[in-house]
Image (cartoon, rainbow, N blue to C red):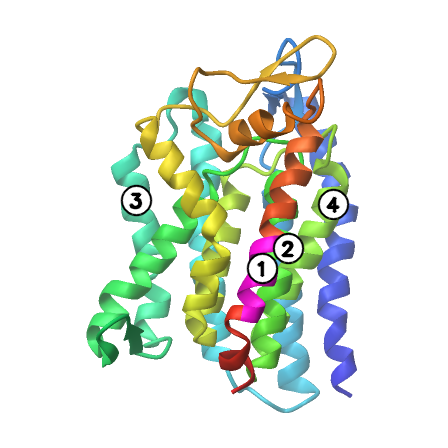
Amino acid sequence: MEYILLFPILLSFVLTIVLLPMWIKKCRQTGLVWEDMNKYGHPKNVASSGGIVVISAFVLGVLVYVAFRTFILKSTENSLAVFALLSSILVLAVVGLVDDLLGWRNGGLSKNFRLLLIICASIPLIVINAGYSHMSFPLVGEIELGIWYVLFFIPLGITGATATYNFLAGFNGLEASQGIIILTYLSIISYLTGNPWLAMMGMCMVASLVGFYIYNKYPASVFPGDILTYSVGALIAIMSILGNFEKIAVFVFIPYILETILKLRGGLAKQSFCKPNQDGSLELPYDKIYSLNHFGVLILKKFKNKVYEKDIVYLINGFQILVIIISYFLFKYSIYN
């Protein structure tokens, strides 16, 4: 009977591939299109904020999962945590959509106001006292953080993941493929650590992202927007909190930590885009490296004459997979015990 619970995953995928062409068409009709910054001449022909379809499909998939559990399996276990998760994701989806509508070229929401809204999105997790308040620290050992875990570490985790996931972006298919890779791994971790319901949350988002990737891969016909990056980043943090595998999630986030360091090097003012040539190849946009995307161009230039946008995406995805493999062997004992 539990195999019927796989239906919400399929539903999330189908809804995305069915609704996304409609969204793309409507965006083109109404002029809601963005520049493709890594294409020569920066053509303004890519539908904006496709993440709204991804999040809608994800939410509907999760709600169908809850309905199946309630009416077929007669279980409401973890329902409170599921709705807290959905509440946080939806708050961030709204913040991301507003940021998209205001436009990144116009600065979007102010940094301080955006940060405040992201912190507010952690409130649903705070009020249900989510997570496990015992944490281990080097040289100190395990410490019971009590209420400080809820009031400090939960907002910190969600805010950090939400903001930094938005840094490593700007290339066709990058945000979606990274979300697929990371959330698939964390869903497996959730299942192995005795949280199959949490694995379902992750896989519903993965299914939506796979559907989105079909239209977002090079050459993209739709962009994700902050509505998607904020939501995916937050989901990664929320899954790690509810599943009590924060250390694994932090390790998996190494590419984003490195990206944040590079962004801080540029005072958070340098863009991740590269300089496109007429033949579609890319050049470094600055004298220094301010993004893993730039570093990817620098590395690949040593092995091939011309570097293209999809080459950078494949390289970063490969690096992410390598980090995940190392993570599995590093935390293998804690996963199975």
Residue beneath the point at 63% across and 49% down: 54
Is 141 left or right of 336, judged from the image as shown? left
Q: Main secondary structure of the magenta part?
A: helix
Disc 3, SS = helix
User: In the rendered view, does 66 fall on the left or right side of 13?
Assistant: left
Q: Give the quarter of the image for residue 130.
A: bottom left
Residue bearing the label numbered 1: 324
Where in the figure is residue 234, as x and y percent of width and height? 45, 56
Position in image of residue 250 (x %, y %): 43, 60
Secondary structure beneath disc 2?
helix
Look at mark 4 in the image and give the residue it sits on.
Answer: 19
Amino acid type at circle 4 is Leu
Q: For the residue marked with disc 3, what is the amino acid?
A: Leu
Q: Are marks 4 and 2 in contact (CB under 8 Å)?
A: no
The answer to whether the residue labelled 3 contacts the one labelled 4, judged by CB atoms less than 8 Å apart, is no
Q: Earlier in the sequence, mark 2 or mark 3?
A: 3
Q: Residue at x 59, y 29 (%)?
A: 299
Residue at position x 55%, y 86% from top?
76
How many angstroms separate mark 4 from mark 2 (CA)? 23 Å
Q: Which residue is mark 2?
A: 181
Q: Secondary structure at mark 1?
A: helix
Q: Judge left or right: residue 230 versus residue 117.
A: right
**C-alpha separation, residue under disc 1 versus residue under disc 3:** 28 Å
First of labels 3, 4 by sequence position: 4
Question: Three-letter amino acid code at disc 1?
Answer: Ile
Q: Determine which residue is flagged by label 3.
A: 115
Span of residues in magenta: 322-329
Say whether residue 324 is magenta.
Answer: yes
Q: Position of residue 271 (x, y in %)?
A: 45, 24
